[in-house]
């Protein structure tokens, strides 16, 4: 559901609204917590908007659209063009849709896609544009360029912007793959590159999940492939946070388990292994996370009808009136206090009368958000474990 502007501020994910003047359009973009560039329009986006192809487009693809700072000014400038915005983060997709509707941009389509995976194969674009994520890894950048060339019209053009630290990687790919990359713009922090269409270029057929593979980690006897750019998985989390969960869930024998924000699958798959008769429902907003939960489930022989993967931009909406014996997940420190409180209350509801939720948070977030907001909580919180900067809560109605 897309909310009118007056209601957006009531959404716990709402952070701010940014004024965006670009290509003759004056836009006011609603911005949520926990997505890219929430404090200002990114410098790379602004540089790319200043260095677009000269030919007016009829069909545009904005790859990794975020809340719409790149694609929506283009849609406003070229109302006859069909502009498609895609992102693997369904939260970003939701807010890009909100912003498109708020400005009456009827020539815009927004949907989730893991890279080009969910963009219809037959579609061809005059422009493909992308602000390349800094931590995405070389294999995906290679795929972005190689596959992009085959998705363009005969006179189409792919343009990307990236931080200067990625320039050697991008230019190296151009040389090794014999791609005629042209540097179109430069700033103190970013560079813009262009690449013309080549329908004869060999199609990159790599599986989407393989493009992101970073390394492999072992947890509780299981082997997890871990992707680039998943976020929130620093060494301290693996060493301290995950073991806290594993210690706590040993004492339960649930029939239904909810794992929310499970990244690449540690909590749902460990639960699947420990409770083989339980139904495990994993809710994740990042399509990359969903893909890697699926990959890791297959790798560890834990796939099957007992494991259900749910794609949702807000996890409470995805579970509706369901009840679970056990819910496990982590609060996001970058999502803010209002989101944390909303999720705690939603988890208490999901646990029903007899279930419990185990929720991990940073001790800092407990101290600054949760304790001062006790009167706003519609749930009972018990601190079970406090260790290494983390605190584990038991949450009940």
Image (cartoon, helix red, strand yellow):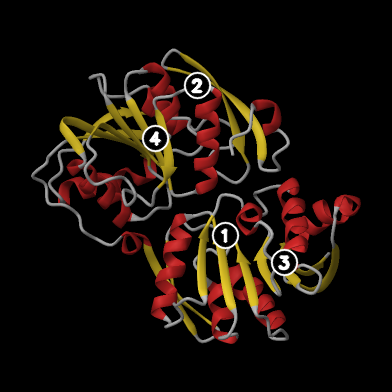
The structure residue drawn at horizontal position 42% and vertical position 63%, both measured from the top left corner, is 291
Q: Are marks 1 and 4 in contact (CB under 8 Å)?
A: no
**Of label 3 and label 4, which has the lower sequence position?**
4
Q: Is residue 292 left or right of residue 58?
A: right
Q: Nearer the viewer, mark 3 or mark 1?
A: 3
Q: Secondary structure at mark 3?
A: strand
Q: Nearer the viewer, mark 3 or mark 4?
A: 3
Please name the residue that numbered disc 2 is placed on.
Answer: 104
Tag on residue 313?
none
Please name the residue that numbered disc 1 is placed on.
Answer: 232
Q: Nearer the viewer, mark 3 or mark 2?
A: 2
Q: Nearer the viewer, mark 1 or mark 2?
A: 2
**Of label 3 and label 1, which has the lower sequence position?**
1
Tag on residue 190?
4
Q: CA distance from mark 1 to mark 2?
A: 35 Å
Q: Nearer the viewer, mark 2 or mark 4?
A: 2
Q: CA distance from mark 3 to mark 4?
A: 39 Å
Q: Residue furthest right?
A: 375
Does residue 391 sit above or below 93 in this rendering? below
Q: CA distance from mark 3 to mark 1?
A: 15 Å
Q: Nearer the viewer, residue 253 or 290?
A: 253
Tag on residue 359?
3
């Amino acid at each position: 559901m897309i909310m009118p502007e007056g209601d957006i501020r009531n959404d716990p994910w709402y952070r701010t609204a940014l004024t965006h003047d670009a290509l003759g359009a004056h836009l006011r973009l609603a911005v949520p917590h926990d997505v890219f560039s929430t404090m200002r329009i990114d410098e790379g986006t602004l540089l790319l908007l200043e260095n677009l192809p000269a030919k007016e487009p009829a069909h545009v693809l904005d790859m990794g659209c975020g809340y719409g700072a790149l694609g929506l000014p283009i849609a406003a400038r070229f109302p006859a063009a069909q502009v498609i915005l895609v992102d693997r983060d369904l939260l970003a997709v939701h807010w890009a849709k909100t912003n498109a509707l708020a400005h009456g941009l009827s020539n815009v389509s927004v949907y989730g896609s893991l890279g080009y995976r969910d963009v219809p194969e037959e579609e061809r674009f005059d422009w493909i544009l992308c602000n390349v994520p800094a931590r995405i890894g070389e294999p995906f950048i290679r795929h972005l360029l190689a596959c992009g060339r085959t998705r363009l019209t005969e006179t189409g053009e792919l343009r990307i912007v990236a931080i200067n630290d990625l320039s050697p990687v991008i230019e190296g790919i151009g040389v090794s793959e014999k791609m005629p990359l042209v540097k179109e713009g430069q700033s103190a922090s970013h560079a813009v590159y262009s690449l013309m269409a080549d329908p004869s270029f060999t199609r990159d057929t790599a599986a989407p999940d393989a493009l992101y593979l970073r390394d492999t980690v072992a947890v509780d006897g299981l082997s997890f492939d871990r992707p680039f750019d998943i976020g929130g998985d620093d060494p301290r989390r693996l060493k301290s946070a995950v073991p806290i969960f594993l210690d706590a869930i040993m004492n339960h024998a649930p029939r239904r388990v909810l794992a929310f924000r499970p990244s690449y699958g540690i909590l749902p798959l460990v639960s699947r292994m420990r409770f083989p008769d339980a139904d495990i429902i994993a809710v994740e907003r990042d399509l990359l996370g969903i893909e890697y939960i699926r990959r890791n489930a297959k790798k560890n022989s834990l796939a099957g009808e007992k494991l259900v993967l749910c794609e949702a931009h807000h996890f409470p909406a995805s579970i509706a009136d369901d009840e679970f014996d056990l819910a496990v997940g982590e609060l996001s420190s970058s999502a803010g206090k209002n989101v944390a409180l909303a999720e705690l209350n939603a988890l208490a509801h999901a646990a029903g009368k007899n279930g419990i939720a185990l929720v991990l948070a940073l001790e800092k977030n407990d101290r600054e958000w949760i304790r001062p907001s006790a009167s706003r909580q519609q749930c009972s919180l018990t601190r079970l474990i406090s260790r290494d900067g983390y605190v584990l809560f038991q949450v009940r109605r």
